[in-house]
Image: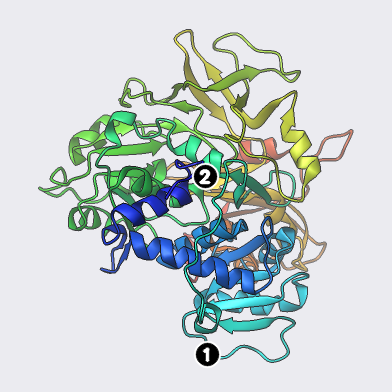
Amino acid sequence: MAFEHPDLMPQLVAKRAAENAGSAALKHVDGSVLTWSDAYEDSLRWASAVERLGVKAGQPVVTVFANSFDGFRSWQGCAWLGAIESPINTNYKGDWLRHVVNNTEGEVILADARYAQPLFDIADQLTFIKHVVVFGELEEAPESLPFKVISSEEFLEGEAADERPEPAPWDVSSLIYTSGTTGRSKAVMVPWGHIKSSLESGLFPHDWLDGMRTYSPFPVFHITGKAGFYYAAAHGGASVIRESFSISDYWDDVRNFDANAGVILGPLAHMLMNQPEQDDDAKTPMQTVVMSPVIPNVDAFCERFGVNVFTAYNMTEINCPIVSLGLPSTGENYRSCGRARPGVEVRIVDEHDIAVPPNTPGELIVRSEPWELNTGYWNMPDKTNEAWRNGWFHTGDAMTYDEEGNYYFEDRAKDYIRRRGENISSFEVESIINEHPSVAECGAVAVPAEEGEDEVKVAVVPEPDADFDPAELIQFLIPKMPRFAIPRFIEVWDELPKTEATARIQKAKIRDSGVTDTTWDRVDAGIKLPR
């Protein structure tokens, strides 16, 4: 088959199906295998099934899947229709879920049965949804839902694997939701050219790509979770998937499925290092690890597990503009995110977008070739205009660079929280906590966690005469927000520090107060969050 854009993800899958039909594309740790022929034919069948529900090219399709074959089928099925996959975090519920589903304005949801109930719980608040397709066993849908619930069998019945026009680099592959800092979560419009540019950036050094077999225990609603399938299609080695990252199973999975490359987030690397040492720690096929951020004891990590560690700086909106360029991370250079790669322009600037000299903190801004960066935020033109100023994308992250061209991450956007790989909007956390009848107002911030990155801390001002109980607040939040966003630390304040001119909460003062003997700790209190 001949394509005009043969190096995009869907076309690569089609090529593998033609040349390596029975070979494995994806291997699940439960032993199941998705071949290239099935991956391609399934995507064409899913495209026809989604089209039969009324979806047209350029329209979003909401998907709610764990890291599973269906998660990839839905992505590729949307691709061949020209629709836009809109994967939702499987932890979302309540107002968090309502916002993202309504923001897409999509009319169809494809969801694993496990994640259907949170959708049913807010059914009357979902403005645009007409069909919900449920994959797996569903006990019974509630009566009088404002949309039609369809089984996966009915959805796919009679659909043929007919070939379709190919996607183009400028077509939007996905809407990937990322945290807002002072507002609701935003849907990043990610074109197919953006995905190719990101994953061929040198994130994994180019001379390591041939024969690479990735281990990818990350969710498909993030770019990281999609990367393994791309590398499999582009370079031939099957990607191994697990529904979620497991510290205890990590190295057994790597050995059992002969994986030789993977991404490990800094906090997860800390956890792996904290596991009891084993005689065979270094006896695995794993050779190449991309770690971000790099842990200080990276030399010990490499020696213990017999790997080479590389790093990069990235966010959903951009295309890995700063990478190791093949230089391994060590204890001497672990603070560096790498250097600017070819084909991308990066600049550290002041508040007027004027470049600052070396070793001077400023905001990182980026620009690249057409369709290699995001094309804005879906249904949020004001946020798009704010981020894309003067022809550059503004990351909101403070960085520095040295005379040799090494870049260093300094600080996050001021109200941004990242916990174990998940971006959390302080605005959304505060909005839900403020619904509690005993809370007058609150401020949510990030504080350092034991494994790196952040934990969520909230300063709460109770209502006058309220009998405020932090443990009771946690129980109030459990059904209303994702597990990863529920605060660990809570403090009672008489009043929150605010600016005189605008009466905005001074988050820095809450952050700087840290965690003290008077800070209530959910973990110390013995409260376990349901999974």
Q: Is residue 381 something one can see in this rendering?
A: yes
Amino acid type shown at disc 1: Glu
* For residue 162, above or below residue 137: above
Residue beneath the point at 48% across and 57% down: 220
Quadrant of res 335:
top left
Q: Please say if 385 is above or below 103.
A: above
User: Mark 1 falls on what kind of element?
Assistant: loop
Q: Earlier in the sequence, mark 2 or mark 1?
A: 1
Q: For this rendering, which residue is in front, 132 or 406?
A: 132
Q: Which mark is residue 82?
A: none
Label for residue 139? 1
The structure residue drawn at horizontal position 54% and vertical position 84%, both measured from the top left corner, is 154
| Above or below: residue 471 compared with residue 349 | below
Q: Position of residue 311 (x, y in %)?
A: 39, 31
The residue that appears at 81% across and 65% down in the rendered structure is 465
When asked about the image quadrant of residue 145, the answer is: bottom right
Task: Kindly check if marks 2 and 1 are in contact, taking CB atoms under 8 A apart as contact.
Answer: no
- Viewer-proximal residue among 140 and 47: 47
Q: Nearer the viewer, residue 384 or 42?
A: 42
Label 2 crowding class (10 Å Cα cut-off): few <14, some 14-19, many 20+? Answer: many
The way the protein has been coloured in the rendering is rainbow
The residue indicated by pointer 2 is: 454
Q: Is residue 229 visible?
A: no
The front one of 149 and 192 is: 192
Q: Give the SS element for disc 2.
A: strand
Task: Identify which amino acid the numbered label 2 is placed on.
Answer: Asp
Q: How many marks?
A: 2
Specify whether 323 is left or right of 433: left
Crowd band around label 1 with a 10 angstrom C-alpha radius: few (<14), some (14–19), many (20+): few
